[in-house]
């Protein structure tokens, strides 16, 4: 794919569906699309353009199953299997589906700003999350526009970040309950990855702040204290409401977000109620 710049963007109308933005820069509800039906070339082009523009798309009241969700996601690329979190035993034949099930026995643990699987050499392009069961209140998900977060940095900070590389690792999160032997064995297959602190979105050409508090451990070739201070400052950028949108889930709702330009946060405010979500993740490319 030829490298794009923001000047290459052409603003065109959407003719196959309508969009209702949830904020000025991120998040839009899509009306007029059933994810259980075939996605033709024109519809794919318009949905992909909407995804690039709004970073996360919401499809309400979708009557779909696992196969429909996988088929829809596959239009954007190969589907990943998550190596550390397996689908529950009720669906052993669908490793593409990551089931996130919380109840009175397990509180939500995704209540921190992050982008999915940045510890991979090829982090994901995007994620598609479907609400299976939702609590009576709470359990919202928030997304942050990390392109807008970069744009609003001071120009001196932007210059300072130019060329910096950070390391991303899974051990502090997924390795917490693993013994040392298991971690070392998995390290051979999933070593820490290094990505630019500011990546270029491959389809829009925009600069995106690409570090997150879940997986980014340090900035390469920087003193530990200085790295920690800088990362703490950069992590905070996702927390500004000006860059965010928020979704109140209902059963059947689907969110499709661009992991290359967003972070997300699952509010863990519904314990002890039950919340069940199922996620499909589309494989991406090497950040530059």
Image (cartoon, helix red, strand yellow):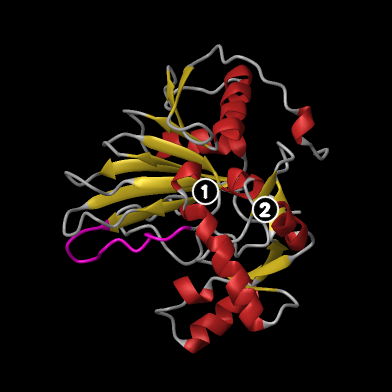
Counting other residues with Cα less than 10 Å from the Cα at mark 1, is it few (<14), some (14-19), or many (20 or more)?
Answer: many
64 lies above or below 183:
above
Q: Front-most of 267 and 63?
A: 267
**Residue at horizontal 64%, vertical 49%?**
150
- Whether residue 71 can be seen here: yes
Q: Provide the residue span drawn in magenta.
A: 102-113
Q: Residue furthest bottom?
A: 180
The CA distance from mark 2 to mark 1 is 33 Å
Q: Which residue is mark 1?
A: 281
Asked if residue 109 is among those painted magenta in the image, a careful observer would answer: yes
**Residue at horizontal 75%, vertical 65%?**
164
In the drawing, does residue 13 fall left or right of residue 251? right
Residue 12's x, y, as percent? Answer: 65, 16
Q: Which mark is residue 154?
A: 2
- Whether residue 115 can be seen here: no
Secondary structure at badge 1 equals strand
């Amino acid at each position: 794919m030829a490298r794009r710049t923001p000047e290459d963007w052409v603003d065109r109308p959407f003719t196959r569906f309508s969009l209702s933005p949830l904020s000025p820069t991120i998040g839009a509800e899509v009306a007029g699309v059933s994810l259980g039906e075939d996605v033709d070339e024109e519809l794919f082009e318009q949905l992909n353009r909407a995804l690039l523009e709004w970073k996360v798309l919401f499809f309400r009241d979708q009557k779909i199953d696992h196969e429909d969700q996988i088929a829809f996601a596959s239009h954007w690329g190969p589907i990943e299997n998550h190596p550390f979190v397996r689908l529950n035993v009720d669906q052993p034949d669908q490793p593409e589906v990551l089931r996130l099930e919380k109840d009175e026995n397990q509180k939500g643990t995704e209540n921190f700003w992050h982008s999915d699987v940045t510890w991979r050499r090829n982090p994901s392009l995007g994620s598609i999350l479907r609400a299976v069961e939702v609590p009576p209140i709470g359990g919202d998900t928030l997304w942050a526009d990390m392109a807008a977060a970069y744009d609003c940095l001071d120009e001196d900070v932007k210059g300072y970040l130019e060329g910096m590389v950070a390391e991303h690792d899974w051990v502090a999160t997924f390795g917490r309950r693993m013994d040392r032997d298991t971690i070392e064995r998995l390290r051979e297959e999933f070593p820490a990855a290094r990505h630019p602190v500011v990546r270029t979105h491959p389809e829009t050409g925009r600069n995106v702040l690409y570090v997150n508090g879940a997986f980014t451990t340090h900035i390469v070739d920087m003193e530990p204290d200085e790295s920690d201070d800088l990362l703490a400052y950069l992590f905070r950028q996702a927390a500004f409401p000006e860059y965010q949108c928020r979704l109140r889930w209902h059963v059947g709702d689907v969110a499709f977000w661009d992991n290359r330009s967003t972070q997300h946060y699952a509010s863990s405010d519904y314990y002890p109620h039950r919340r069940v979500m199922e996620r499909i993740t589309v494989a991406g490319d090497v950040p530059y």
